Image: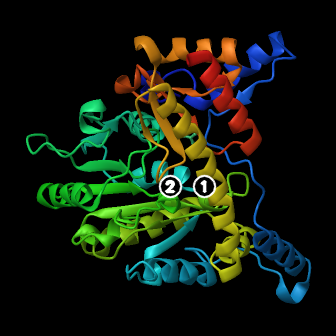
Amino acid sequence: MKLCPNFKTLETNYLFADIAHRVNAYQAAHPDAPVIRLGIGDVTLPLAPMVVEALREASAEQGVKETFHGYGDEQGYGFLQSAIVDYYASRGVALAQNEVFISDGAKSDLGNILDIFSKDNTVLIPDPVYPVYVDTNRMDGRPIVFADANEGNGFLPLPDPAVHADIIYICSPNNPTGAAYDRAGLQAWVDYALEHEAVILYDAAYECFITDPSLPRSIFELPGAKQCAIEFCSFSKMAGFTGTRCGYTVVPEALANGEARRMWLRRQTTKFNGVPYIVQRGAEAVFTEQGQREIHEALAYYQQNAAVLANTLTELGIWYTGGKNSPYLWLKCPNGMESWAFFDYLLENANLVGTPGAGFGRNGANFFRLTAFGDQAKTAEAAGRLRRLLG
Ligand code: MLT
């Protein structure tokens, strides 16, 4: 047999695995160091009480013959699809139930969706970027062109009409930079995609952090987007499902005359047996009135962390994006430091962990990401350490 040669084009380790190894090694060498981790965007608050109750009830149902569920419906249970359709309707976006596919998270779907696209498509990816978009395309051997996101464009690149692409990735609010497109910026990408007969793979995993009502939360709020976009979303950041696993993908019927939706259904029914019934019941509870109140309390907790970190950076005179409408803060490393050097400096001198911008691409070389998903007391402590170290 021959192993896939494309894997040779990848970094040896996945970025967050690499950071975890480095931090664990530091902690092993300094067992008493009070390390605070603001690196990977993992949540720290537990599931909402409404979700836990729904999980408990569904588990009990699974133990009774009359209410037991085996294999689920192929695109996910109707009760969850229709709750998602209502969620979009409340924001003025009309979806049909069969356009919504339930999955175990946005990351898997963002990688798996590539099965329905030919390998000779040219892919356009902003740099810096969530490494999954780049790595999954490298695994398939697709040609990639990068759109530079930098200080000059506020880390929100706009399409270059001279560059042709077939598959375009957009994440807004962005991971890692926290920057979010306004309607005009996102419309420019939709118009470009329509003109180039391209598809936008729109990662909306952080939409629930948008508080500015003028910013779009779904690409489908923009005219023409249903003809050229697929949207990925997740309960991970919205409702603390990083360890529970549930997400959804919207493939509009209007895309490629229904062909893309049918192919995704064919792919999923062949390679995926769905998300557990119990988990889908938990996700459904997120959309109840009480569930929404509870998850918004958790989101407010993280938003408070983001504000604490943002105020600290402002006080220190450090340039940054994000922190508003996003759980991420993307800061310029002080004194022109390289991001991995800054990572070591912060770890060794403040016992603080963040994510080096270089891990997200060339344009991240002098930037650094902090997350607002930490514990509130620890985040306040981290802000104090930053002030002492960098003030
Ligand atoms: C991140 O830290 O970028 C995210 O937690 C990774 C993910 O959502 O997979």
Q: Are marks 2 and 1 in contact (CB under 8 Å)?
A: yes
The residue that mark 2 highlights is 206
- Where disc 2 sits, the SS reads loop
Residue sitting at x 67%, y 24%: 385
State whether residue 54 is above or below residue 208: below
Rendered image quadrant of residue 280: bottom right
* Identity of the residue furthest to the bottom in this view: 66
Along the line of sight, the residue nearer the viewer: 348 or 70: 348
Q: In whole angstroms, how far apart are the C-alphas of marks 2 and 1? A: 7 Å
**Whether the residue under disc 1 has CB within 8 Å of ligand 1:** yes
Rendered image quadrant of residue 82: bottom right
Q: How many numbered circles are shown?
A: 2
The tag earlier along the polypeptide, 2 or 1, is 2
Residue sitting at x 35%, y 62%: 215
**Mark carried by residue 237:** 1
Picture coordinates of residue 365, whole percent (x, y):
40, 20
The amino acid type of the residue labelled 2 equals Tyr
The amino acid type of the residue labelled 1 equals Lys
Picture coordinates of residue 158, whole percent (x, y):
21, 45
Residue 14 can be seen, yes or no: no
Rendered image quadrant of residue 384: top right
Residue sitting at x 35%, y 50%: 170
Give the quadrant of ligand 1: top right
Is residue 197 rendered to the left or right of residue 349? left
Is residue 303 rendered to the left or right of residue 191? right
State whether residue 14 is above or below residue 293: above
Residue sitting at x 52%, y 42%: 328
Residue 108 can be seen, yes or no: yes
Is residue 108 rendered to the left or right of residue 128? right
Q: Quadrant of the C terminus?
A: top right
Picture coordinates of residue 368, whole percent (x, y):
49, 27
**Mark carried by residue 389:** none
